[in-house]
């Protein structure tokens, strides 16, 4: 029960950025000044606060609209984090891509309601509601992309297997997403706690079913990806990832039936791909969203 609360209950994030070396490696801290500077810039940007309803209660997001673009990116943060915290990893990426940006807080994180994180088991339905919201707001006339990182990437991939998605959902960018929940818990548990992972996972899943209403065994991303035959996916992963092994994206890539591409970032750790090579990351996203065409330039009236 204690382990379950530590892993799944709403986190209390420290004000100071902390990146455990066991998961992020010993060199990730060098990025903290840049990330903190991005946080300060983002805090000054004007945005629209938007909310939707879910089984967890109200979910909150910040919408940075670009009226001159027909592309919208929903940014989905990772485990034990928030949208505005993780968007700090990406600097001016989305501005350079000339897209509208919706930064959301997943259930039980940030300013959204909810008690438990479910590693994508329930969050996938929340993301679909955000897609429905944008599709209705723009009457299906704007292209929608998901850009998820870590758990947000895995959740985005799970969305592709859901029914009733509108035609306006055009693609998913999955940055260092896991292939199955028990796999990443086993991997992390062995590194951090030296636990007997299978026995621990059985206990965690029992409590998840009773207290949280979700089944961790149903969060098998690779299995769900077999159902997706249409939505294009861009997989991104650092080869030196110590939290979610690079091989998990390889498994997801192989499992995907639809259009796909896998881009490896040599020597990049967890959530470090953009920070390690901004030019490559930006270009891969540009090609994924716009194809061979150049980014549409914003027009201004003098």
Image (tube, rainbow, N blue to C red):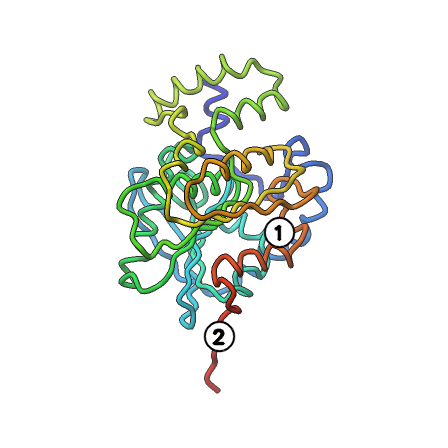
Query: How far apart, in angstroms, are the residues tagged by discs 1 and 2?
Result: 23 Å
Q: Nearer the viewer, residue 8 or 134?
A: 134
Q: Quadrant of the N terminus?
A: top left
**Where is residue 24 drawn, in percent x and y?**
65, 37
Q: Nearer the viewer, residue 97 or 210?
A: 97
Mark 1 element type: helix
Q: Quadrant of residue 257?
A: top left
Q: Residue at the location (48% across, 75% down)? A: 298
**Where is residue 237 drawn, in percent x and y?**
59, 42
Left or right of 82 on screen, residue 89 = right
**Where is residue 189 drawn, in percent x and y?**
58, 22
- Mark linked to residue 227: none
Residue 80 visible? The answer is: no
Residue 288 visible? The answer is: yes
Neighbourhood count class around disc 2 (C-alpha, 10 Å): few under 14, some 14–19, many 20 upward: few
Q: Residue at the location (41% across, 20% down)? A: 205
- Vertical order, 256 against 88 (above or below): above
Q: Are marks 1 and 2 in contact (CB under 8 Å)?
A: no
Q: Nearer the viewer, residue 25 or 244?
A: 244
- Vertical order, 225 against 236 (above or below): above
Q: Residue at the location (67% across, 43% down)? A: 268
In the displayed orientation, state which residue is furthest to the bottom. 302
**Residue identifier under label 1:** 274
- Vertical order, 86 against 227 (above or below): below
**Where is residue 54 drawn, in percent x and y?**
30, 42
Question: Which comes sooner in the sequence, label 1 or label 2?
Answer: 1
Neighbourhood count class around disc 1 (C-alpha, 10 Å): few under 14, some 14–19, many 20 upward: many
Left or right of 222 on screen, residue 265 = right
Q: Nearer the viewer, residue 280 or 135?
A: 280
Mark 2 element type: loop
**Residue identifier under label 2:** 298
């Amino acid at each position: 029960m204690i382990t379950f609360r530590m892993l799944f209950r709403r986190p209390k994030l420290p004000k100071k950025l902390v990146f455990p070396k066991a998961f992020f490696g010993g060199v990730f801290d060098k990025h903290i000044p840049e990330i903190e500077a991005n946080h300060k810039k983002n805090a000054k940007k004007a945005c629209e606060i938007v909310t939707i309803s879910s089984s967890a209660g109200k979910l909150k997001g910040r919408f940075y609209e670009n009226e001159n673009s027909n592309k919208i990116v929903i940014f989905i943060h990772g485990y034990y984090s928030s949208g505005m915290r993780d968007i700090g990893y990406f600097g001016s990426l989305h501005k350079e891509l000339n897209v509208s940006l919706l930064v959301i807080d997943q259930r039980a994180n940030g300013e959204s309601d909810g008690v438990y994180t479910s590693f994508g088991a329930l969050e996938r339905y929340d993301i679909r509601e955000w897609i429905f919201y944008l599709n209705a707001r723009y009457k299906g006339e704007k292209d929608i992309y998901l850009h998820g990182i870590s758990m947000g990437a895995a959740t985005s991939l799970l969305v592709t297997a859901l029914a009733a998605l509108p035609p306006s959902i055009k693609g998913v960018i999955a940055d260092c997403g896991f292939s199955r929940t028990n796999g990443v818990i086993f991997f992390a548990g062995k590194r951090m706690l030296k636990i007997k992972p299978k026995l621990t996972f059985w206990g965690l899943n029992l409590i998840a079913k009773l207290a949280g209403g979700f089944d961790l065994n149903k969060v098998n991303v690779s299995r769900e990806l077999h159902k997706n035959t249409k939505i294009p996916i861009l997989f991104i992963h650092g080869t030196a990832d110590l939290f979610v092994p690079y091989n998990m994206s390889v498994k997801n890539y192989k499992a995907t039936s639809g259009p796909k591409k896998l881009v490896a970032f040599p020597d990049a750790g967890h959530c470090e791909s953009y920070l390690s090579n901004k030019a490559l990351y930006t270009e891969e996203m540009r090609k994924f969203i716009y194809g061979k065409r150049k980014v549409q330039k914003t027009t201004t009236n003098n």
